[in-house]
Amino acid sequence: MKRTATNSRPLKAWFPLFLVFILVYTSGCMTLEENPVSGNRRAFAFTWQQELQIGAEADQEIIAQYGLYENEDLSNYITELSKIVLEQSHMRREGTSQQFRDAEFTFRVINSDIVNAFALPGGYIYFSRGLLAHMNNEAQLAVVIGHEIGHVAARHASQRILQQQAGQLILVGGAIAGQELFGMSAESILNIGSMTAQLLFLSYSRDNERESDRLGVEYSAMAGFDASEGAAFFRTLQRLSARAGGTLPNHLSSHPDPGDREQSMLQMSQEWRERGFEQTRRNERQYMEMIDGMVLGQNPREGFVENSMFYHPELEFQYPVPSGWNVQNMPSQVAMFDSQQQGISIFTFAQGASSARQAVEQFTNQEGITVISAGNANLNNNPGYRAIATATNQDGTELRFMVQGVEFGGQYFRFINYSTSASYEQYESNFTQIVEGFRRLTDSSKLNVQPVRIQVVTADRTGSFQSFLPSEMPMGMEPEEMAIINQLNLNDTVTRGQRLKLPVQ
């Protein structure tokens, strides 16, 4: 969660973007247009102009929710590298319609430690700093860049939306809104319509993913990058999957098996060599120089959990995390939920509020919410206001909320704690523990904490990778995690002169 309140978005701020999709779905329309990859005309959910509009609108919501990684040099480097790959894509080839050839692409680095890249319709492509940390050279990144450009060029999002069952609304990027209220869609809770936002980005088919893999190799190989290096990234995904207990992250669950993709990547790269594309560009040195100093893992300045307490050094507050609960910290909110995702607590800026009461009423005054009780409820000398309310979701399940507003540090914040009414009594003590534990952070060791950063070093000797790691790992880092980031095993031999990414705090 970041300091400025400009990242906070009221739930209804999503309505214009929802409306774009509703107009398409409820009218049942489709359009026959060119597929830039095949050159053939086929059915799409949107015209290309609509895709441009959708991408532009969703882009602003993604920036608001995730935030951009604030490093202009790195951002410019990623953009220039991406443009090199883009020039070899179908979007820039002779014979492709001018509307595609003229389309401007936008490449962004988002401030997330999750290993992820994704594309939106119209040419908006995002790379997390977590993804960049796990790559060792330009060639590996070029394959991923080509993959995401491939999704845009093949217009996979528009294809997939058209393939969904009638009446099922899929919103690209929509789960960013849905995440505000885990387990239930925001629209269901507010009971203001049938719109849903339950998926974190559109789930492409495996055929879509295989086609984008093929295009990623094609575009990067034609640009001169060693596309076989892309296989190393899929080995990394395998290791991340194994470390997480064998389950890929949600955004990768529809993708082909990483092991299969690794082998096909090597095979496809060799095929392009046989066609005369030498693929000599790897450029490890410049890539490592660009990520040197990049924040690694979660940035504790924006909030962190330690010993069942959430601390926010920048905003100087803390509050408890119930035992066994998970925490998801995003620029605009902090979400906590139990293992069953039945007890949920969301902490956000109350943008536009001028009192703790107004912070609560921004939520409770929305259609479909019934207030049971409300009144002043200060939190450790901070002015506060609390309401208990109910709402009924689309399947008829009644939800019960504890909504707490608080004035702190000249700003206004809101806790939205909820569960089903049937389970509310089970979680009420957790909700009370959270809100009544909110207080000013005074511990200097927490206030002054700094993020872990990547330090690129050149090995001055030969030895095992583990021997280069600090004896006491920085906050939140583990030796195996650093081995994966370096695409090494802990016992692998590092030779003198080899570049390594080490953690420093």
Image: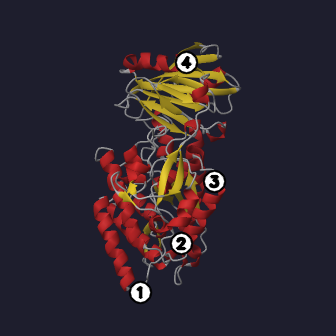
Whether residue 166 is visible to the viewer of this picture, yes or no, is no
C-alpha span from label 2 to label 3: 22 Å
Which residue sits at x=55%, y=35%?
A: 333
Q: Label 2 amino acid?
A: Leu
C-alpha span from label 1 to label 4: 69 Å
| Residue labelled with disc 2 | 86
N-term-proximal mark, 2 vs 1? 2
How packed mark 2 is, by other alpha carbons closer than 10 Å (few <14, some 14-19, many 20 or more), is many
Report helix, strand or loop for mark 3: loop
The circle on residue 276 is 1
Where residue 277 sits in the image (x, y, percent)? 43, 83
Where residue 153 sits in the image (x, y, percent)? 48, 70
The circle on residue 387 is 4
Image side of residue 334 versus residue 255, left or right = right
Of discs 1 and 4, which sits in the foreground?
A: 1
In terms of depth relative to the viewer, which is nearer, 267 or 463? Answer: 463
**Would you place residue 336 above or below residue 379 in this image?**
below
Of discs 2 and 1, which sits in the foreground?
A: 1
Of discs 2 and 3, which sits in the foreground?
A: 3
Where residue 373 sits in the image (x, y, percent)? 53, 14
Image side of residue 352 versus residue 242, left or right = right
Report helix, strand or loop for mark 4: strand
- For this orientation, the residue located farthest to the bottom is 276
| Residue labelled with disc 3 | 71
Q: Label 4 amino acid?
A: Ala
